[in-house]
């Protein structure tokens, strides 16, 4: 299959919205009077973003009987220079999926990019002569040409999420997207509003579908530890560089097969450098959402649901600092470019019906709460990552995103009599979205439902850049008497990429 990455004049896209070209084209399986996909038909999916996370998520998407990946899109054709979490972890997953232990062997990391995506799709489905998966470098070209698409699956770096999600929904496509909804508050709000206005099936990957969520709801709602006054959540991230004080000065050549202009998307142009791409994009203000945005979505989904949280009243943050010697003087290093190496953030939430006011604390970069007496009593230390609910009559400690919850100390758990199960256990997150595409209930993590905690995370990232306590007015989506913080709720866009 010929690569469509360079066949279309990209400038033609910059002068007009994809919505104009595609809004009149509804997916071929759309029911009359609605945009639901008939259950008897497979959902045709355009898959955007084939880096390590994209390839990892492509496998279960291919295995789902109700989905059909018909096009893949990534500005990188193919390369083996992607940063991985563990040696050969992703390569091994692909080898197992294909039943081919020789796949991807050789120098470098697991091959990724749109050609890798095409290969996996065609090998799984079995490409027919002249058919097979279509490949694109530009998602806008994919939306304009692939008229039979029902949905778009977004697995790109953070800075492209809102841009692609909005274009897809304007074109009448259901959307599933990795977290976050956007890099800044305005982007997340636009995405959530568009989902509500169109009524399309949407889902954000954020640990929805976990058994522990309804379990903790039952425990806490039935008074297992009394009214919850504090929550502490801590992550060992970042594993990637943060705290950078300057942009890279080197200007290496753009790798063959990478369209750097498309990778930047809405971000004002800058020279290519590998310090921006792949897994390391997370640490930059322009491209990622830092440790909080990368991991907080997984845990905040549970916290907000369990405690029935809405918008916070205030947010305040502290961040790591470091000093360097310059001309025989100690100089504190400041950055307006990257998230800190470590931070702690605190949100204050008002009382909700029968639940008291609560303070939510976040820690990253190796920071964590002090050792609590209940763990000390049991001869334990604070875990490297965790989630702690502090109530009037007890404490619950869980894994970072809420798994394996237990009352502490051990004696309290031994005495505990769990309440009767009253809440349904969720189905798999991908399955929730598929059912929503077919006319079922919206997923637990639809864009509208996840917006409140997405907003809290994004204003937390703003607090990292503005000293002192910031008061938040959710009704107006503005900070109170803090124009410098309000200015960070949006960002500059390249001409032609404005939202």
Image (tube, rainbow, N blue to C red):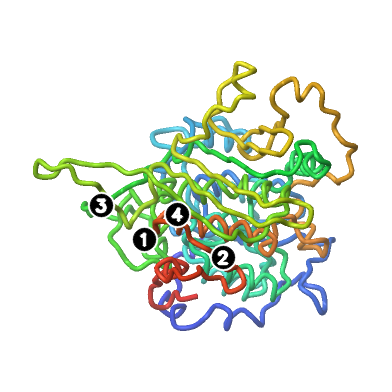
Q: Residue at image x 67%, y 59%?
A: 310
Tell me which residue sits at (90%, 37%) in the image. 420
The 10 Å Cα crowd at callout 2, few under 14, some 14 to 19, many 20 or more, is: many
Tag of residue 198: none
Which dot marks residue 248?
A: 3
Say which mark, if any, is on residue 260.
Answer: 1
Q: Secondary structure at mark 2?
A: helix
Q: Between label 3 and label 2, give the one nearer the viewer.
A: 2
Which one is nearer the viewer's eye here, 70 or 454? 454
Question: Separation of disc 3 and disc 4 at Cα?
Answer: 17 Å
Above or below — where is 103 with respect to 145?
Answer: above
Q: Which mark is residue 188?
A: 2
Q: CA distance from mark 2 to mark 4?
A: 14 Å
From the image, state whether disc 1 or disc 3 is nearer to you: 3
Q: Secondary structure at mark 1?
A: helix
Q: Nearer the viewer, residue 148 or 36?
A: 36
Residue 288 in picture, x, y percent from top left: 45, 54
Q: Which residue is mark 4?
A: 288
Check disc 4: other Cα within 10 Å, few if <14, some if 14-19, many if 20+: many
Of residues 174 and 105, the one nearer the viewer is 174
Of mark 3 and mark 2, the one earlier in the sequence is 2
At numbered mark 3, what does the secondary structure look like: helix, strand or loop? loop
Residue 486 in picture, x, y percent from top left = 45, 69
Q: Are marks 3 and 4 in contact (CB under 8 Å)?
A: no
């Amino acid at each position: 299959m010929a690569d469509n990455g360079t066949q279309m004049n990209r400038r033609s896209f910059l002068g007009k919205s994809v919505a104009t070209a595609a809004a009149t084209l509804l997916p071929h399986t759309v029911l009359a009077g609605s945009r639901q996909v008939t259950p008897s038909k497979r959902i045709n999916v355009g898959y955007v973003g084939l880096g390590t996370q994209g390839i990892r998520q492509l496998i279960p998407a291919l295995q789902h009987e109700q989905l059909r990946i018909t096009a893949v899109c990534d500005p990188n054709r193919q390369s083996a220079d992607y940063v991985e979490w563990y040696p050969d972890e992703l390569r091994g997953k692909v080898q197992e999926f294909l039943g081919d232990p020789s796949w991807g062997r050789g120098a470098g990391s697991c091959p990724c990019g749109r050609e890798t995506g095409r290969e996996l799709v065609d090998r799984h489905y079995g490409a027919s002569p002249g058919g097979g998966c279509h490949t694109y470098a530009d998602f806008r070209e994919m939306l304009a040409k692939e008229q039979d698409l029902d949905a778009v699956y977004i697995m790109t770096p953070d800075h492209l999420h809102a841009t692609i999600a909005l274009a897809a929904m304007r074109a009448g496509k259901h959307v599933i997207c990795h977290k976050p909804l956007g890099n800044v508050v305005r982007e997340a709000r636009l995405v959530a509003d568009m989902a509500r206005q169109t009524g399309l099936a949407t889902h954000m990957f954020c640990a929805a579908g976990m058994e522990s969520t309804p379990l903790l709801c039952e425990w806490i709602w039935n008074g297992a530890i009394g009214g919850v006054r504090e929550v502490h959540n801590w992550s060992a991230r970042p594993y990637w560089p943060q705290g950078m004080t300057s942009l890279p000065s080197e200007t290496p050549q753009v790798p063959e097969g990478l369209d750097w202009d498309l990778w930047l998307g809405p971000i004002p142009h800058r020279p290519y450098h590998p310090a921006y791409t792949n897994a390391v994009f997370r640490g930059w203000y322009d491209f990622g959402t830092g440790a909080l945005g990368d991991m907080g979505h997984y845990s905040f989904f549970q916290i907000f649901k369990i405690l029935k949280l809405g918008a916070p009243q205030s947010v305040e943050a502290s961040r790591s600092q470091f000093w360097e010697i310059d001309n025989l003087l100690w100089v504190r290093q400041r950055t307006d470019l990257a998230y800190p190496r470590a931070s702690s953030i605190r949100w204050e939430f008002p009382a909700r019906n029968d639940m008291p006011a609560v303070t939510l604390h976040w820690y990253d970069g190796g920071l964590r709460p002090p050792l609590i007496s209940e763990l000390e009593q049991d001869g334990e230390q604070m875990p490297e990552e965790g989630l702690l609910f502090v109530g009037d009559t007890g404490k619950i400690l869980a894994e970072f995103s809420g798994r394996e919850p237990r009352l502490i100390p051990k004696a309290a758990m031994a005495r505990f009599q769990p309440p009767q199960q009253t809440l349904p256990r969720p189905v798999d997150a991908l399955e929730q979205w598929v059912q929503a595409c077919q006319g079922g209930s919206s997923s637990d993590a639809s864009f509208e439902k996840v917006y409140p905690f997405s907003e809290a995370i994004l204003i937390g990232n703003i607090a990292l850049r503005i000293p002192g306590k910031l008061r938040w007015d959710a009704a107006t989506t503005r900070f109170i008497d803090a124009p410098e913080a309000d200015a960070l709720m949006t960002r500059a866009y390249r001409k032609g990429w404005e939202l």
